[in-house]
Amino acid sequence: MVAFIDANRDLYGVESICKQLPIAPSLYYEMKAREREPARIPPRLQRDRQLSLEIRRVFDANFEAYGARKVWRQLRREDIVAARCTVERLMRSLGLQGVVRGRKCRTTIADDGSALPLDRVNRQFQAERPNQLWVADFTYVATWAGFVYVAFVIDVFARRIIGWRVARSMHAELVLDALEQAIWARSGAKGVVHHSDHGSQYLSIRYSERLAQIGAQPSVGSVGDSYDNALAETIIGLFKAEVIHRRGPWRGLDQVEYATLEWIDWFNNRRLLEPIGNMPPAEYEAKYHQSASQLPMAA
């Protein structure tokens, strides 16, 4: 509004313009004085301006995915003091809004002819240490070149993504490659419970044999029931909301693969997750290993 008056004051005069606008001439002159003398700006407005810059920085640095609550928590981690209601107010004034997850899509194709492993999880997605429980699932992404599919393997303890793969088909190789990456990242998986849905890819002979080779215990939920693989569905929901729906349309596999790599690096190392105390998965795991290494010393 001040810029509009500046652009037209020589033609119409300040008072004439202010009569047509919801602004008093005295307020306009005060705003111009503040431009010349920043010290005249009230402390609260100065604080809002500085905090707005920090909010914009945090929002941009986190895939533009954080809402007010996550932005507020990240500011607290950086020792920037601000009330949550203030962050909400400033984000509204800046036009910033976090992502909102939408409907989930099913990719599970049941294999009714296979003998099913037991459900060793029973919807209790909790682990006391890394490599105790892994969950696996995959989703699809529409691109100009056709559908591509993204598979994930997640360690439940810290919700850390330890294996992933992008492919043009949802055959068993997709989920096998993601599993191999998880095995490499964890230097083995003996004794881990590996939970998936009823999809034929996870019940394939090659996948089952690979789990047996590494000493993992297979676990399978029911078909078409997201609650039986709820944690994996949640991570995929975040991926779709924070990357796929927000940054498309997608040209092809290479673009999706690079964006997935960027997002997983951010998710594992910088994204705040409320279920693990509003810290990134890698930090949560590091704290566990640090505590475990100190136990013999304490004894």
Image: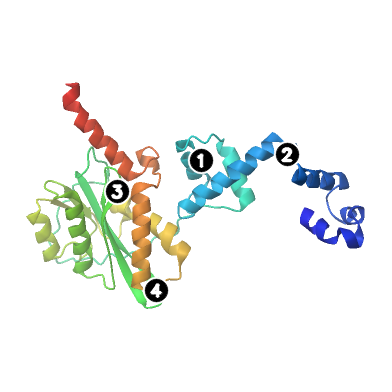
At label 2, which amino acid type do we have? Ile
Q: Residue at x 9, y 50 (%)?
A: 215
Determine the CA span between mark 4 and mark 1.
34 Å
Q: Which numbered dot is residue 143?
A: 4
Q: Secondary structure at mark 4?
A: strand
Determine the CA span between mark 1 and mark 2.
25 Å
At label 3, which amino acid type do we have? Arg
Vertical placement of residue 12 versus 80, above or below: below
Query: Residue 4: percent from the left, percent from the top?
Result: 79, 58
Determine the CA span between mark 3 and mark 1.
23 Å
Q: Which numbered dot is residue 72?
A: 1
Quadrant in which the N terminus appears: bottom right
Determine the CA span between mark 3 and mark 4.
27 Å
Query: Residue 259: percent from the left, percent from the top?
Result: 38, 63
| Residue position marked by numbered label 3 in the rendering | 160
- Badge 3 or badge 4: first in the primary sequence: 4
Q: Please identify, in this view, whether the residue under mark 1 or under mark 2 is nearer the observer.
A: 2
Q: Residues within 10 Å of mark 4 (few under 14, many from 20)?
A: some
Vertical placement of residue 60 versus 252, above or below: above
Q: Secondary structure at mark 2?
A: loop
Q: Nearer the viewer, residue 89 or 119?
A: 89
At label 1, which amino acid type do we have? Trp
- Badge 4 or badge 1: first in the primary sequence: 1
At label 4, which amino acid type do we have? Thr
